[in-house]
Structures are given as structure tokens and as C-alpha cells.
Amino acid sequence: MVILLLVFCPLVWGQGSVVFLNPGKADESFWQDVDTFAAVAAKQLDLDLQTFHSERNHYSKLKHIEWMIENQQLPDYLMLVNERQALPRMLSLLEGHAVYVVVILNDLDEDQLALRKLNPHWQKYLLSSLVPNNYAIGYATAQAMHAAAKGGGGDAVIISGDKATPASVAREAGAEAFFLQQTSINMRQIVYGLWDEQRSYYQTKVLLQRYPQLRFLWTANDHMAFGSLKAIKEAGKQAGKDIFVGTVNTSEKALELRETGEISALGGGHFSAAGLALNLIYLHQLGKPIPATVNSNMFQLLVPGTQEYQQLKDKNWSDISFDTLLLERDKSFNFPVVQ
């Protein structure tokens, strides 16, 4: 339907045109936060930003790129995500076309990136990648769950996202590493909830039966945590007392559950990736040098009562001066906080 609409309503790009091929669903809380933050940045930086959601269907992203090429509707810049390892195929379609690419959230692996660095086309047009440290936040949230339990032991399970997306793999690895380091914790199983609340709900029901002594349940995103919390409650157990839950993302519901203690550990901030990538594009337009890779400290543990926590609840990004978020080469930066 999107492709048909575009055929009858051709795109007209403004100056500094940017298309963000969002791999998520338009109604997912995380991707809504990504879009909102990016929209504020684009307006402030005077960039013409258009966002299209693939609804977790990587084939849809490929078809959209094919349509833009066939109809000569490529923008000046594309923001892409290597969700489920779809980025190499997208870059193959784009090779030879004069469109700059910025990669956010999930990057190419080292071998794939090395191939592009040898390619004259991508030496010019593959500008930068902006990737949060998913391993670190996986580790930190698992550690915070353990601290919330006052260092107690017990069984632990992980409900990861999927087996292919780099962010999912790294986030899972961080959580697993912490659990395996604790002699008092028995790391029992890793399952894959595919980022879906209902799937995680059913998985948790099975896991609770399989591991009656389950004490720690970590999920790769908030929607899966919601499903798990529902199953925990139905089993007659109390989250934050009987079972400690840790997860990632900054949806309104996740923040509320962190305040009530039903979520014992919460990490977030990486929704800012698209907005910060727009700052890189802004710098590139000005002819300023930008780093090839930014391993950003966007993630942080979210603690109720702190300034960062309140800012995330208010979602008031208009006070951030995006044009002053200038990056020096090889310098990382923290999630921007309004002072």
C-alpha cells in the first residue's frame, strides 16, 4: 500500500533531504520515541526528514529502496539500520547511486565493513555509523537486577530479541556474561521473544513451570518485559519481590513500572540515535569532518527521581541545542541532558 501511494504521490524533497527507513512498527513505543526525537532534531537543524516504517519486515525496506531508485526519488541522505542483517543487501541496491548513508543502532559486522572500505563508492558515500554499547547496557541491567535482590542467588533466564540483529546479540551477551560471573546464580536458558509482548508472555508461562525457583528474568526490550510481568502475576508471584525483572527502553509504561518496582532495572537512551545521526548529517552539510564510527554512550541506567529520568518522562526535547552537539573525531558523547 505504501508503494502504491508513493506511485501516485511522488516525493518532493527539500534542501538537506533525509529518509529514515525505520525497521520497526509505527505503534511500537521505542520507535515512536526514535521518531519524535529525530523530528525535533530535523526541525531545529532545518533538514527535510521523511520516515517510513517497515513494520519489522526487512523485505519492505528493500522494496522501498528499489522504488526510490526506479523512480529517481533518492534523497540526499539515507539513515539505515542493520536489523536482521538486511543492511548488506540494502547497500548493494544503493551502490552506484549518489546518496549518502548513515547507519544507526545496528552496524555492519567487521568483515562486511572492511569490504565497503575497499570500495571507492562507499569510501565516499558510507559516511558514519552511530551505535550504542548494547553489551554494556545488557551487563549493567543484569547487575542492577542482582543489586535490587540485595545480591541473592537463584535461577536466571534471558528472553532475547532475535538471533541475527547485532543489538540483540550484544545486549543478550552482556546480560549473560554478568549472570555467568555470579556463583550464586544459575543461568538456566536463553529464549527468543522476537521483541513481541504476547510471545514473551507465553514463553514466560513455560519458563515459570520449568524453573520453579526462577529469581531473575531479563528481557531485551520493554514489550517483552510487559508480557513476562503479566505471566508472573498470573502465576501468583510478585515482580520486584519474588522475581526480579530487568529490561531496556523508555516507554511511558516501562518508566511507570520502574517507579513501582515491578521492573527492577531499566536501561535506555538509545532512542536518541536518529536525532544524533541528523547532527552528523548537519555537520557533513557544513563541510565539517565527522567520525567514521561513533560508539556512543547513549545508554544509561534509569533511576527514578533523577534529572535524566524526569526528562525522559517529560519528553521535552525542544530545549536541546542540536546544532551545538558538535562531535570531534573519535570522541564519544553521552545522551544529551538539558541542564
Image: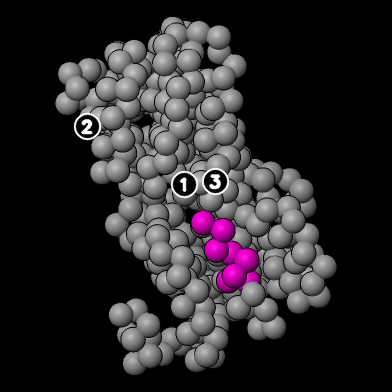
In the drawing, what numbered circle is on residue 167?
Answer: 3
Residue under the point 56% across and 58% down: 85
- Where is residue 9? Give x, y as percent: 35, 89
Callouts 1 and 3 close, C-beta under 8 Å: no
The crowd level at tag 1 (other Cα within 10 Å; few <14, some 14-19, many 20+) is some
The earlier-in-sequence mark between 3 and 2 is 3
**Residue situated in front as seen by the camera: 16 or 77:** 77
Q: Quadrant of residue 149?
A: top left
Element class at badge 2 = helix
Whole-percent x and y of residue 315?
37, 46
Identify the disc placed on residue 265.
none
Tag 2 residue: 230
Q: What's under tag 1, amino acid-wise?
A: Asp
Residue type, mark 2 in image: Lys
Q: Quadrant of the N terminus?
A: bottom left
- Mark 3–mark 2 Cα distance, whole angstroms, equals 25 Å
Circle 1 sits on which residue?
A: 162
Looking at the image, do the residues carrying marks 2 and 1 touch, with CB atoms under 8 Å apart?
Answer: no
| Magenta-colored segment: predominant secondary structure | helix
Q: Quadrant of residue 211?
A: top left
Where residue 66 appears, as percent x and y from the top left, is 51, 82
Q: Which residues are magenta?
A: 84-91
Q: Is residue 157 visible?
A: yes
Using the image, determine if residue 210 lies above or below residue 23.
above
Residue at 33% x, 61% y is 26
Looking at marks 1 and 3 on the same chain, the residue that comes earlier in the sequence is marked by 1
Of residue 70 and residue 329, the one placed in the foreground of this image is 70
Tag 1 or tag 2, which sits nearer the N-term?
1
Residue 292 visible somewhere in the drawing: no
